[in-house]
Image: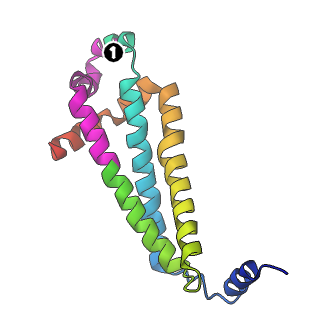
């Protein structure tokens, strides 16, 4: 006997009863993309700041254009707190928006467990891969440049949070 669930989902998709895509979905996707980019920068910055070698730090101290970066590195507890607060704030925003997006886009009243599993799987995959893993790998390989790039925004965020 054939499983009726895939056939049911296929019929719903064909009949456009599951997917209803409009302008506010596009706006949410744009906001989600921006939040994932922010999450990537914050996650990558954690690795970049804390994987700088002492020789890199000494080299950065000799260059006056890195004052913001040096300020951040000299207070590692405050830097870590800023990174964690900002990353959690962004990730909560991503989860709330993506859950709303998925709920309004895909609605399976006959199988809410499947709907929940799809949402959790997709949201977790994108958040972990693009918001955590890839940025940390990149930041590890380019820690000095990545730390320089995010130091100015982090000083601003640190002032706002503090």
Q: Which residue is denoted by mark 1 in the rendering?
A: 57
Residue 99 is drawn in which quadrant?
bottom left
Q: Nearer the viewer, residue 53 or 128?
A: 128
Which residue reaches farthest right?
1
- Residue 71 drawn at (x, y percent): 21, 25
- Residue 125 drawn at (x, y percent): 56, 54
Colouring convention used in this rendered image of the protein: rainbow
User: What range is drawn magenta here?
Assistant: 59-87
For the C terminus, the image quarter is top left
SS at badge 1: helix
Q: Is residue 62 above or below residue 10?
A: above
- Residue 116 drawn at (x, y percent): 52, 71
For residue 27, say whether it is visible: no
Q: Is residue 98 above or below residue 75?
A: below
Residue name at image x 71 percent, y 80 percent: 5
Q: Is residue 139 left or right of residue 155?
A: right
Residue 68 is drawn in which quadrant?
top left
Residue name at image x 32 percent, y 10 percent: 58
For the N terminus, the image quarter is bottom right
- Residue 91 drawn at (x, y percent): 38, 54
Q: Nearer the viewer, residue 104 or 153?
A: 104
Q: Nearer the viewer, residue 23 or 100?
A: 100
Residue name at image x 28 percent, y 14 percent: 61
Q: Is residue 140 above or below residue 99?
A: above
């Amino acid at each position: 006997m054939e499983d009726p669930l895939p056939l049911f989902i296929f019929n719903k998709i064909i009949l456009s009863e599951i997917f209803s895509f409009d302008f506010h979905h596009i706006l949410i996707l744009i906001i989600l993309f921006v939040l994932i980019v922010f999450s990537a920068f914050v996650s990558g910055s954690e690795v970049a700041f804390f994987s700088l070698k002492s020789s890199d730090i000494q080299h950065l101290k000799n260059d006056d254009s890195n004052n913001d970066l040096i300020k951040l590195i000299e207070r590692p507890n405050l830097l870590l707190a800023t990174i964690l607060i900002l990353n959690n704030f962004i990730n909560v925003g991503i989860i709330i928006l993506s859950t709303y997006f998925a709920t309004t886009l895909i609605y399976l009243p006959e199988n809410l467990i499947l709907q929940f599993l799809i949402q959790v799987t997709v949201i977790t995959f994108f958040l972990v891969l693009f918001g955590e893993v890839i940025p940390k790998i990149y930041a590890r390989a380019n820690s000095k440049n990545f730390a320089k790039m995010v130091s100015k925004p982090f000083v601003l965020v640190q002032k706002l949070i503090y």
